[in-house]
Amino acid sequence: MTSFAILFLIAIIGGAAVTLQGQFMGLMDQGLGTRESVFITYAGGGLLVGLAMLAARGGNLRAWQGVPWYALSAGALGLLIVGIIGYTVPRLGLSTAFTIMVASQFIMASILDHFGLLGAVARPMELSRLAGVGVLIFGVWLMTR
């Protein structure tokens, strides 16, 4: 079992990578355009994961039929996310754009958790979590004013 400290560190690295990607996407968006920067991002990522799958002698792509149909929209949602990051970062600034996006992620995650939607384990909204959402909304207001 992976320790919480290792998972915490991995999550920090992921957050830093998303921020760097947002900055780089914003630069590409300004120089190339939104569609072109999304294409470069996904083409580069697709190439790298394709090479990784080849190096690992394939993968388990045949199991796609056992995945819920709505989960297969993750790639399309990824395109939307990457496009929105590239478009909003140069217009709102990195910290404002990400503050809004991260706060909306927490709010959406809390809703999915509370109701156990789309395969999430139901974790009822507690007062402390509701207070956290309120603090997030206040933080967004502070960052964007």
Image (cartoon, rainbow, N blue to C red):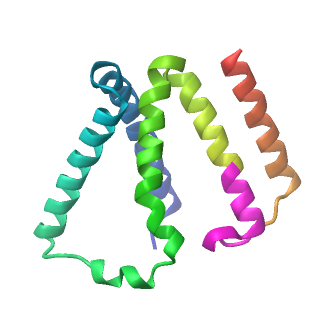
Judged left or right of residue 135, residue 86 is: left
Secondary structure mainly formed by the magenta segment: helix
Closer to the camera in the image, 36 or 136: 36
Judged left or right of residue 117, residue 72 is: left
Q: Measured from the top left, where is residue 3 in percent x and y?
A: 48, 64
Q: Measured from the top left, where is residue 38 in percent x and y?
A: 33, 39
The C terminus is located in which quarter?
Answer: top right
Relative to 44, residue 29 above or below = above
Name the quadrant containing residue 135.
Answer: top right
Numbered label tally: 0
Judged left or right of residue 34, residue 31 is: left
Q: Measured from the top left, where is residue 46 in percent x and y?
A: 23, 54
Residue 113 is covered by the magenta coloring: yes
Closer to the camera in the image, 114 or 37: 37
At a point 82% along the width and 59% down the height, the residue shown is: 125
At a point 74% along the width and 57% down the height, the residue shown is: 111
Closer to the camera in the image, 13 or 73: 73
At a point 41% along the width and 47% down the height, the residue shown is: 79
Relative to 32, residue 46 above or below = below
Read off the magenta span: 108-123
Q: Measured from the top left, where is residue 9 in percent x and y?
A: 44, 49
Extreme-right residue of the structure: 127
Relative to 29, residue 84 above or below = below
Relative to 52, residue 131 above or below = above
At a point 18% along the width and 61% down the height, the residue shown is: 50
Extreme-top residue of the structure: 145
